[in-house]
Every structure is written in structure tokens, then in C-alpha cells.
Image (cartoon, rainbow, N blue to C red):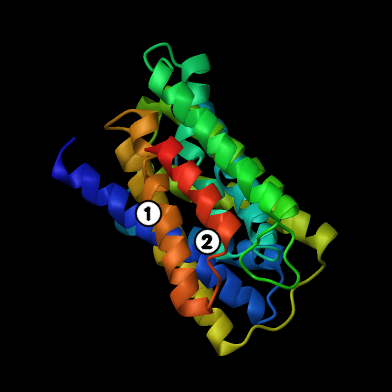
Amino acid sequence: MNLRIWLAIGVAALGWGTSGVAQRAALAEGIPPVALVAVRSLMATVLLIVMIGLAGRSLPTTRQAWKLGAVMGLLNLSVPFVTMAIALQFASAGFVGLIIALIPLVTAGFAHLLLPDEPLHGAKTIGLLAGLGGVLVLLLSGDSGIGTGGRPLLAASLSFTGVVAISFAGIYAKRHQTSYDPMVLTGLQFAFGFVIITAFMVVYEGMPPPVSPWGWFLLLYLTVPGSVMPFLLFYWVLQRTTTTMASLTAYVVPLIALLSGIVILDERLEFGIAIGGALIMVGVV
């Protein structure tokens, strides 16, 4: 891979890695989790519409492109955004980030089943088993990284649901890699995601409460460096390399999430998280 691809992977990982900390800070401001991702999706949709217009791009006219946007809006945005935002109520950003680290392994498993040119070799199989073993350690330890109020089993289940959705979405996008423009697909993804998430928000939480100025700043951070930029870079990378390689952002995301959570939110690196996280990272590497 060339330097531009590595830089794109690194910048995307930085955005996604710090978004968990920003989400936990926004939750502390009283913003409900589903409302948080609904507003984040709306802001991203508006920004991307402006970007598409300024770039002289146009919305797709084919049914296939709109179908791809809808699938990505559901699997690559709505499901992981909602499940992980709720999970952050019950575990630290570092804990959730370690579950996210399983994305390359789960993606490799799906690629083996669905993409004939990306078979699952012995080393990847061992890595997948080690990663799942790390998740088991996390669950058995009972550590959540936030002390009182932590529910690691629920947080891990929600986060892993998001991981499965993201991994399958990456395979689906790879199979349609010649049919989309990264900026347009990202815009469609957020537009469809906003509709889906808002419908769920109305049923699950009702209308959101007023947001403080600091809350709006956090939402803006989650929109630009935490959402739009990483997704644009991810789809750009996905068109130029394999799905497993594109998912390498998840190598760096847990480390960024863990360190930023400890430094910014005073989260705890508990024994179970350290051991389970080490197993997950060994499996991924």
C-alpha cells in the first residue's frame, strides 16, 4: 500500500477512536444516546449535501446506487451508531473500543464466506479465536471501566452487534465498489441513517431535550472528525485495497479510545479489560 492509504487509515482511526470519548461526554451533558446519533446524522447529512453541491457532484440515478446507500445507512450507520451509543452508557470508551477492534477479524470471516479472492487462512483463524477469547475474558471479568453502573455483558453484546453489522456492510460495499462515489455514498448513507435512527428515537426515547452549548460543540466534533471524515476516507480506501486491509482502522481505534478515555474522562484501566484487551489485540495483529 502507498503512503496515502496508510495516512487515510490513520486519520480515520483517529476520528473514530476519539468519537467514543466525545459520545460519553455528550451523554454526561444529558443528551440521550439515540437522540445523540440522530442529531449527529442530521448534521452530517446537511454537511455532505453542501459538500456534494460544492464539488459539482450529483445524486445517483440508478436503483443500485440508492439501494447501496440504504443498505449502508442501515448496516454501516444506524445499527452500529445506535448500539454503540447505548453501550457507552454501561461501559467505558476503551471497553467499547476493544470490542470494535474485532472488526478486521469478523470482516475476514465474512470475506472468506462471501468474497472468493479473500480466503481465511490459518493465521487469521487463530487470530479470530484469540480475539473472541479476549471478549470472553472481558465478559467473565465483570470489568466495565466505569465502576458503579457498569454492565459489561450488555455493553459487549450491543457493541458486538454493531461490529457484525459494520463487517458485513464492508463486504457489501466491496462487492459494489465500482458503482459509487465515496462522497455521494457517504451522503446517502447518512441521509438514510438519519431517517432510520429518528424513527427509532421517537419510539425508544421520544423527542430530545434542549442541548447545552458544550453539547452542541461535542455534536459538531462527532459530526465532522468523528463521522464524515472517517467514512469518506474509509470508502476511498475500500476502493483501492481489500476489505480486510480497509478495516485496519480498528487496529488503532481501541488504543486511541482507551488512552483518550483515561486522559480526558478519567476512565479506569481495570485488570479484566487489560487482559481481555491484550488477547483481542494479539488476535487482530
Question: Helix, strand or loop at disc 2?
Answer: helix
The disc label shown at residue 104, or none: none
Q: Residue at x 36, y 60 (%)?
A: 14
Observer-nearest of 77 and 16:
16
Q: Earlier in the sequence, mark 2 or mark 1?
A: 1
The disc label shown at residue 13, or none: 1
Which quarter of the image is occupied by the C terminus?
top left
Give the mark count. Answer: 2
Q: Amino acid at mark 2?
A: Gly
Q: Label 1 crowding class (10 Å Cα cut-off): few <14, some 14-19, many 20+?
A: many
Q: Which residue is mark 2?
A: 94
Residue 23: quarter of image: bottom right
Q: Position of residue 226 (x, y in %)?
A: 45, 62
Residue lying at the far bottom in this picture: please name it: 213
Observer-nearest of 244 and 264:
264
Q: Residue at x 61, y 48 (%)?
A: 80
Q: Amino acid at mark 1?
A: Ala
Q: Residue at x 58, y 35 (%)?
A: 132
Q: Residue at x 58, y 36 (%)?
A: 133
Residue 137: quarter of image: top right
Establish if 35 lies above or below 68.
below
Question: Is residue 38 at least partly visible in the picture?
Answer: yes
Q: Position of residue 35 (x, y in %)?
A: 69, 67
Q: Position of residue 70 (x, y in %)?
A: 59, 38
